Image (cartoon, rainbow, N blue to C red):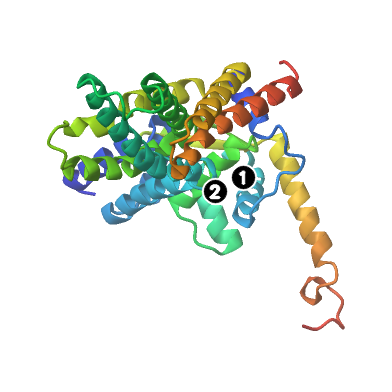
């Protein structure tokens, strides 16, 4: 194998984990694989490793939540921006539901959706991020409201990203906390008479966190201690 | 190590019967057969020879990883040899859980094949 080919192979193998890299490159050297075969083997392994993540249902659910949740939260962010503008202009007549409750709902919806995506995505987080960025970018670039900044439709991003970070780190919310969050969100949604029917699915991540916390709690009780 | 054990037990905590795929069974059997000499290239060569099927490095290593996550295999880095360009071998060993899963798979295949014409050694049986 030429030096250039060896360099390309070694560089592409850097994507693999250290112990895996040694095993794979050693195996290829042992069977005397050529540059093309080695290259195909490394990228074949990477492709299979990524495909392996999709054997589980969790990345599918995370991706399935990322796209519709972003779409809905974009609309809610826009509504809150319009209401905040009206509030700043002293026109509170059009604001039926207390403004702070709307903001609280937006923050909780975003955080719970983000938490669900972060805890379920694992190595496929980039796919979920891509799916949620498609409607965001599309909306920002097509935004035509002169009195508002384009960024106002992305109000959900900060609590959403915090949720993703917490989800990746914690994996589970304590059961009581999850129950309080889900009950509060549902109560606020029931109290909000003018809420669109299409926004109701945003309650699902909160109740999913309750179910996951309950399952995790039961599992810990079942496992004997080491 | 303890974390690994917890992870493994956690993964299989509610699984009474680990179901193997055909390739997973082949890999476990070949690995068990190679004993202390079981590592990537040797397993691959043995699969090609005994099972008569092609086995890519990608298929081999992703299956090893999957079986390791299920607690059916353990891997560790072995010695480096000049033949391998100074690279270490990724050694593989079947765990007792892996041996049990392979035995279950084998017995299931024997049971379901009992009345099949191609499984019988009787001279009068024909396909």
Left or right of residue A67: residue B51: right
| Relative image position of residue B118 (x, y in whole percent) | 77, 75
Q: Residues within 10 Å of mark 2 (few under 14, many from 20)?
A: many
- Quadrant in the picture for residue A65: top left
| Relative image position of residue A47 (x, y in whole percent) | 39, 49
Closest to the observer: A210 or B42? A210
Q: Secondary structure at mark 1?
A: helix
Left or right of residue A127: residue B7: right
| Relative image position of residue A126 (x, y in whole percent) | 35, 38
| Relative image position of residue B75 (x, y in whole percent) | 55, 33
Residue B43 is labelled as: 2
Q: Residues within 10 Å of mark 1 (few under 14, many from 20)?
A: many
Compared with A143, A175 (above or below) is above
Q: What residue would you read off at disc 1?
A: B31
Closest to the observer: B93 or A101? A101
Q: Tell me whether the residue at label 1 lies in contact with that at label 2, contact meaning CB atoms closer than 8 angstroms.
A: yes
- Quadrant in the picture for residue B51: bottom right
Closest to the observer: B90 or A175? A175
| Figure quadrant of the C terminus of chain B | bottom right
Q: How many marks?
A: 2
- Using the numbered discs, state the Cα–Cα distance from disc 1 to disc 2 in whole angstroms: 6 Å
Q: Does residue A111 appear in the picture of this structure?
A: yes
Which residue: 38% across, 45% down? A46
Q: Quick one: label 1 or label 2, which is nearer the N terminus?
A: 1
Which residue: 80% across, 54% down? B107
Compared with B62, A115 (above or below) is above
Compared with A96, A175 (above or below) is above
Please report, as a chain letter, where disc 1 is located: B
Left or right of residue A225: residue A157: left
């Amino acid at each position: 194998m030429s030096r250039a080919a060896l360099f390309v192979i070694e560089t592409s193998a850097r994507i693999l984990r250290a112990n895996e890299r040694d095993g794979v490159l050693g195996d290829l050297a042992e069977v005397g694989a050529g540059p093309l075969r080695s290259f195909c083997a490394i990228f074949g392994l990477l492709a299979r490793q990524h495909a392996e993540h999709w054997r589980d249902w969790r990345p599918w659910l995370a991706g399935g939540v990322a796209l519709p949740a972003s779409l809905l939260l974009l609309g809610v962010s826009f509504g809150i921006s319009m209401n905040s503008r009206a509030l700043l202009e002293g026109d509170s007549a059009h604001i039926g539901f207390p403004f702070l409750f709307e903001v609280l709902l937006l923050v909780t919806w975003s955080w719970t959706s983000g938490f669900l995506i972060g805890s379920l995505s694992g190595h496929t987080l980039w796919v979920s991020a891509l799916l949620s960025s498609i409607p965001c970018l599309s909306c920002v670039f097509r935004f035509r409201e002169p009195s508002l900044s384009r960024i106002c439709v992305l109000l959900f991003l900060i609590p959403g990203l915090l949720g993703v970070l917490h989800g990746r780190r914690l994996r589970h919310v304590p059961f009581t906390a999850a129950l309080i969050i889900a009950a509060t969100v549902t109560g606020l949604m029931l109290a909000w008479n003018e809420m669109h029917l299409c926004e109701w699915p945003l309650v699902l991540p909160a109740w999913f966190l309750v179910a996951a916390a309950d399952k995790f709690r039961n599992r810990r009780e079942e496992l004997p201690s080491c | 190590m303890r974390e690994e054990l917890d992870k493994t037990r956690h993964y299989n905590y509610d699984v009474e019967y680990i179901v193997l795929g055909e390739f997973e069974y082949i890999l476990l059997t070949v690995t068990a057969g190679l004993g202390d000499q079981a590592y990537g290239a040797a397993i691959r060569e043995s699969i090609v020879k005994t099972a008569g099927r092609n086995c890519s490095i990608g298929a081999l290593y992703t299956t090893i990883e999957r079986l390791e996550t299920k607690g059916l295999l353990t891997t560790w880095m072995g010695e480096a040899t000049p033949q391998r360009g100074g690279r270490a071998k990724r050694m593989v060993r079947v765990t007792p859980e892996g041996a049990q899963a392979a035995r279950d798979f084998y017995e299931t295949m024997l049971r379901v094949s009992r009345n099949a014409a191609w499984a019988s050694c009787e001279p009068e049986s024909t396909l």
